[in-house]
Image: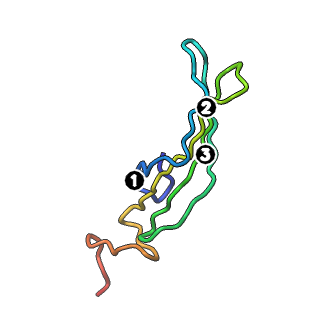
Amino acid sequence: MVPGGGSQALNYGVDRARFLAPARCGKRVRTHAKLTSAEKKPGGRVLLTVSCTVEIEGEDKPAGVADLLSLMIPDPGRAGPGTAPNPGKDDDA
C-alpha cells in the first residue's frame, strides 16, 4: 500500500523483533498493526514505523512482536520542499 502522492514503498527493515511463542500447526493467527510514527526524511521521503503483534487464537501470549519499517518515496512529478526537480516537466524559463 502506497499513500497518495507516493510512487514507491520500500521495505526498510525490522526493529525490535521478538518471537515469544510457537504457533502450532492448525492454530489460527492474526496480526494487529498500528502506525506508531511517520518521520520526514530528505527528498520528501517518509519513514513509517508500524508496530505489529501476531496473536495465536486461544493463547495468552502472542507469537511475536516487531516494528516494521517502510520508506515511502514520493512521485517524482510532485516536486515539493526537499525534492529534486523533475527534468521531464516544462519550465517557464
Please tell me whether residue 80 is drawn above or below residue 54 in the rendered image: below
Mark 1 neighbour density, 10 Å: few (under 14) some (14–19) many (20 or more): some
Q: Which residue is mark 1?
A: 8
Query: What kind of residue is marked 1?
Result: Gln
Q: CA distance from mark 3 to mark 2?
A: 15 Å
Which element type, helix, strand or loop, lies under badge 3?
Answer: strand
Q: Which residue is mark 2?
A: 20
Residue 72 % position (x, y): 45, 57
Farthest bottom residue? 93
Mark 2 neighbour density, 10 Å: few (under 14) some (14–19) many (20 or more): few
Query: What kind of residue is marked 2?
Result: Leu
Residue 63 % position (x, y): 60, 29
Residue 45 % position (x, y): 45, 64
N-terminal label among 3 and 2: 2
Query: What kind of residue is marked 3?
Result: Ser
Q: In the visual, does 70 lie left or right of 21?
A: left
Residue at 48% in and 45% down: 1
Q: In the visual, does 74 lie left or right of 62?
A: left
Name the image quarter holding the C terminus. Answer: bottom left
N-terminal label among 1 and 2: 1
Q: CA distance from mark 1 to mark 2?
A: 32 Å
Residue 61 % position (x, y): 69, 28
Q: Which residue is mark 3?
A: 51
Could you tell me how many numbered marks the image carries?
3
Residue at 36% in and 65% down: 76
Which element type, helix, strand or loop, lies under badge 1?
Answer: strand
Farthest top residue? 26
Instruction: Choose top left, top right, bottom left or bottom right for residue 92.
Output: bottom left
